[in-house]
Image (cartoon, grey):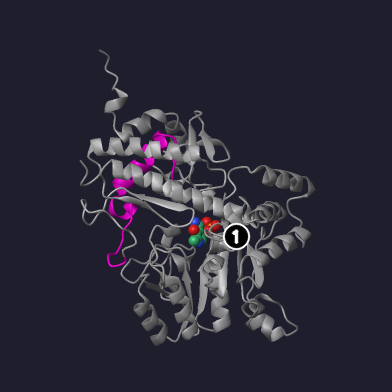
């Protein structure tokens, strides 16, 4: 008998290193260029990442030709799938007409008007180049308009990486590189605790705004109690504090008009990016016209010097992003894309849950709208079925409670042809029943391996 290990006895990590062996060499080179060999914290992967060469629809292929069903969908940007033919045509045609005019152009008006038509809170629009820039500008607008300095954010709610939103709470260490003075202008509260929010808004007269991810922290990884969002709106109104809804992920995805259209909870300011720009870079802040006055020049030098917010950005509303964005938003305005992905995700969650049940595990696959997250076991009580929506028990997702299993699950799914975002992902209109079947099959095989390795607490 030879000495090669039989694939059936190999661990998830061994299978990963074997299948993607080609990546080790690229990674060694990348390590000499990038910290961690990565260009984004979320893309750093050990022992090395996969290297993608091409993508189309719901699929992507690595340098060795391995095919993946892609549930990252451009970190959520590709609601219409990779390289949607209409977007490719629009962007290619725009390339030939110029990529940057350093001037006003008609496409920015068409793009802005679509945003205004779709997003209920969008009386006015200002484009940025990313979601991080959008939340940065929204915070500055809120502070300028109210004349107050503090912002309330919720623990684990992600709003990009600028100094303000990096702050994770008084008990957490100060984020490296963020000045203390900046951190002290942020008040981080636990979500789903209306009494704590109310006491904070009532007792601190210096709060300009509350910012929230409307489906829960980190694209619904941290579930939000169903009545919390309307309660936040109610309390912010009562205490005259602005509400900023961060719809960078959810805008145009959960419904054409975002979560605000789906729920009727209308914020004062909204941040948008991702789907907004049809797969190219782009972001926006939208909101009440009265607040947007603070971005406008007036025939009043004192106003312009003391009150107006300065805002530049080389690639704001650039013609390529505007071409992709208008094309995407026109399709999304038809309504069917959100309905389709929400429906598909519901079926995906239920198929994946059936797999978890078939392995007699206490975890579940949860999420809202077109998002899903896999939690293979109940960390508090490994033999009791987990309910992430039971707000009487604080819920901690897999990457927090078991980072080793989190990494193994992702690698195992990649070995079986599925690429996840963290331990879940999002859907696009290009996903099919076949993709759902493949995901269920991959989860089945991956859980089988992980149970055999003893990587899942309470299993077997
Ligand atoms: N807000 C939310 C809710 C996000 O998910 C993200 C990105 N994942 C951002 C803001 C930051 O957007 P960007 O990556 O475009 O800077």
Name the quadrant of the C terminus: top left
Residue 47 visible to an observer of this rendering = no
> Quadrant location of residue 218?
bottom left
Q: Estimate the x, y position of residue 80 in percent, counting from the top left.
A: 60, 48
Q: Which residue is mark 1?
A: 256
On screen, residue 277 versus residue 11, left or right, reads: right
Q: Is residue 112 visible?
A: yes
Segment tinted magenta in the rendering: 391-420
Residue at 37% across, 28% down? 18
For image coordinates 29% across by 19% down, the residue present is 4
Q: Quadrant of the N terminus?
A: top left
Could you say which is closer to the camera, residue 128 or residue 244?
Answer: 244
- On whether residue 401 falls in the magenta region, the answer is yes
Picture quadrant where residue 326 is located = bottom right
Single out the residue that lies furthest toward the top. 1
Q: From the top left corner, tell me how far across and down residue 226 is, in percent.
A: 41, 68
Q: As rendered, which of 9 and 102 lies closer to the eye?
A: 9
**Most foreground residue, 365 or 95:** 365
Residue 419 on the magenta segment: yes
Q: Secondary structure at mark 1?
A: loop
User: Within 10 Å of the Cα at label 1, are there few (<14), some (14-19), or many (20+) other Cα atoms?
Assistant: many
Residue 97 x/y as whole percent: 79, 48
State the image coordinates of residue 361 (x, y, percent, origin top left).
Answer: 26, 46
Q: Total marks drawn?
A: 1
Near-viewer residue (324 or 447): 447
* 235 versus 162 height, above or below: below
Does residue 412 sit above or below 321 in this rendering?
above
Q: Quadrant of residue 437?
A: top left
Please name the residue shown 66% across and 79% down the image. 293
Residue 398 lies left or right of residue 42; in this view the side is left
């Amino acid at each position: 008998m030879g000495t090669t290990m039989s694939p059936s006895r190999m661990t998830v990590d061994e299978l990963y290193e074997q299948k993607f062996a080609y990546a080790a060499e690229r990674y060694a080179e990348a390590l000499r260029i990038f910290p961690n060999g990565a260009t984004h914290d979320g893309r750093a992967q050990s022992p090395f990442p996969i290297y993608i060469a091409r993508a189309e629809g719901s699929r992507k292929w690595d340098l060795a030709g391995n095919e993946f069903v892609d549930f990252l969908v451009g970190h959520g940007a590709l609601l219409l799938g990779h390289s949607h033919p209409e977007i490719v045509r629009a962007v290619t045609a725009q390339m030939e007409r110029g990529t940057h005019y350093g001037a006003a152009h008609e496409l920015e008006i068409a793009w802005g008007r679509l945003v205004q038509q779709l997003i209920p809170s969008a009386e006015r629009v200002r484009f940025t180049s990313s979601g991080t820039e959008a939340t940065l500008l929204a915070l500055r607008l809120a502070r300028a308009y109210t004349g107050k300095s503090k912002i309330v954010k919720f623990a684990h709610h992600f709003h990009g990486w600028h100094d303000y939103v990096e702050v994770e709470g008084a008990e957490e260490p100060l984020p490296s590189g963020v000045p203390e003075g900046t951190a002290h202008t942020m008040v981080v509260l636990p979500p789903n605790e209306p009494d704590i929010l109310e006491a904070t808004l009532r007792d601190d007269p210096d709060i300009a705004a509350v910012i929230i991810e409307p489906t829960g922290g980190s694209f619904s990884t941290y579930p939000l109690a169903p009545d919390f969002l309307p309660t936040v709106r109610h309390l912010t109104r009562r205490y005259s504090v602005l509400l900023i809804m961060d719809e960078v992920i959810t805008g145009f995805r959960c419904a054409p008009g975002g979560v605000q259209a789906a729920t009727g909870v209308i914020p004062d300011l909204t941040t948008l990016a991702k789907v907004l720009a049809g797969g190219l870079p782009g972001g926006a802040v939208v909101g009440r016209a009265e607040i947007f006055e603070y971005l406008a020049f007036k025939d009043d030098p004192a106003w312009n010097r003391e009150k107006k917010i300065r805002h530049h950005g080389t690639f704001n509303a650039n013609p390529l992003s505007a071409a992709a964005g208008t094309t995407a938003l026109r399709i999304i305005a038809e309504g069917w894309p959100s309905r389709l992905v929400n429906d598909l995700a519901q079926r995906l969650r239920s198929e994946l849950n059936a797999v978890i049940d078939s392995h007699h595990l206490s975890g579940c696959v949860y999420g809202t709208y077109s998002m899903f997250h896999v939690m293979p076991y109940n960390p508090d009580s490994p033999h009791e079925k987990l309910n992430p929506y039971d707000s009487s028990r604080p819920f901690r997702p897999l990457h927090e409670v078991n980072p080793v299993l989190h990494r193994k699950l992702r690698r195992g799914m990649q070995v079986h042809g599925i690429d996840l975002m963290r331990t879940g992902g999002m859907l696009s209109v290009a996903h099919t029943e076949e993709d759902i079947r493949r995901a269920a099959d991959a989860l089945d095989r991956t859980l089988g391996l992980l149970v055999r390795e003893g990587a899942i607490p309470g299993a077997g």
